[in-house]
Image: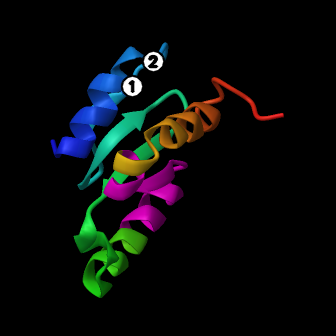
């Protein structure tokens, strides 16, 4: 796991009241984190994901996972480093564990 993946896992995801798996194999892809009960894949993206080839690969991967009924949410490593609380709140909302008024 990257530094950002370790932070998200140990400081947040591991303690949630729902099961979240690390490095989950789905089809011929491996997602960073996956919550089966919410059909939510959580991906943390480094700089390579913002280059043309990485971006195209991510779009294809997300499309395939979407076809399986899985929602893919992506956060940049910068998001985790600079807005950790915001990333956590967004994940909680997507998991249905909090609602925004």
Name the colour scheme: rainbow
Q: Identify the magenta region.
A: 61-80
State left or right for residue 79 relative to residue 48: right
Q: Position of residue 13 (x, y in %)?
A: 38, 26
Assign the C terminus to one quadrant of the image.
Answer: top right
State left or right for residue 95 relative to residue 98: left
Which picture quadrant has residue 42?
Answer: top left
Which picture quadrant has residue 49?
Answer: bottom left
Residue 91 sits above or below residue 46 on the image = above
Please name the residue shown 38% across and 37% down the image: 34
Q: Which residue is mark 1?
A: 12
Residue 48 sits above or below residue 20 on the image = below
Assign the N terminus to one quadrant of the image.
Answer: top left
Q: Which residue is mark 2?
A: 16
In this view, the residue in front, 27 or 100, is 100
Assess whether residue 65 is covered by the magenta stretch.
yes
Q: Position of residue 60 (x, y in %)?
A: 39, 72
In this view, the residue in front, 59 or 50, is 50
Residue 52 sits above or below residue 78 on the image = below
């Amino acid at each position: 796991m990257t530094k950002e993946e370790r932070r998200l896992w140990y400081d947040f995801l591991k303690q949630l009241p729902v099961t979240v798996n690390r490095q989950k194999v789905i089809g011929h892809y491996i997602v960073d984190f996956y919550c089966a009960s919410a059909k939510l894949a959580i991906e943390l993206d480094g700089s390579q994901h913002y280059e043309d080839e990485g971006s195209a690969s991510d779009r294809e991967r997300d499309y395939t996972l979407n076809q399986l009924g899985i929602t893919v949410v992506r956060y940049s490593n910068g998001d985790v480093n600079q807005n950790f609380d915001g990333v956590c709140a967004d994940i909680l909302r997507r998991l249905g564990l909090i609602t925004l008024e």
